[in-house]
Image (spheres, helix red, strand yellow):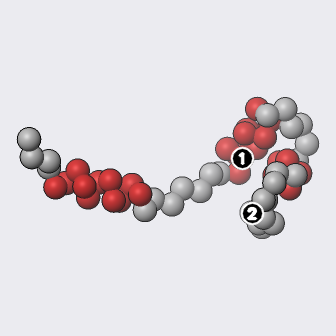
């Protein structure tokens, strides 16, 4: 059974995809984990969190 060469190309493109969550997605994630204040406060308390300018 031979493999389609396009299959390998698709996988390599997916491996290189850069996905950045939106502000809304980050806000919803924080709220789903019980946080009710600013999302920045939630992520500032996460281990290994980096300071990133938003907006």
Q: Which residue is found at the position 71% from the left and 51% from the top? A: 23
- Estimate the spatial distance between the alpha carbons at disc 1 and disc 2, rounded to whole Å: 13 Å
Which comes before the other along the chain, label 1 or label 2?
A: 1
Q: Position of residue 51 (x, y in %)?
A: 81, 66
Q: Which residue is mark 2?
A: 55
Q: How many marks?
A: 2
Q: Residues within 10 Å of mark 2 (few under 14, many from 20)?
A: few
Give the label, 1 or 2, closer to the camera. 1
Q: In the shown orientation, is residue 43 left or right of residue 23? A: right
The image quadrant that residue 19 belongs to is bottom right
Q: Quadrant of residue 6?
A: bottom left
Image coords of residue 2 (percent x, y): 9, 46
Q: Is residue 25 left or right of residue 15?
A: right
Location of mark 1 (residue):
26
SS label for mark 1: helix
* Residue in the image at 85% along x and 47% along y: 42
Do tag 1 and tag 2 residues touch (Cβ < 8 Å)? no
Residue 40 can be seen in this image: no
């Amino acid at each position: 059974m031979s493999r389609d060469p396009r299959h390998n190309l698709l996988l390599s493109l997916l491996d290189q995809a850069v996905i950045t969550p939106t502000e809304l997605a980050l806000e919803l994630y924080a709220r789903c984990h019980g946080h009710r204040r600013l999302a920045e406060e939630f992520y500032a308390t996460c281990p290994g969190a980096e300071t990133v300018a938003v907006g």
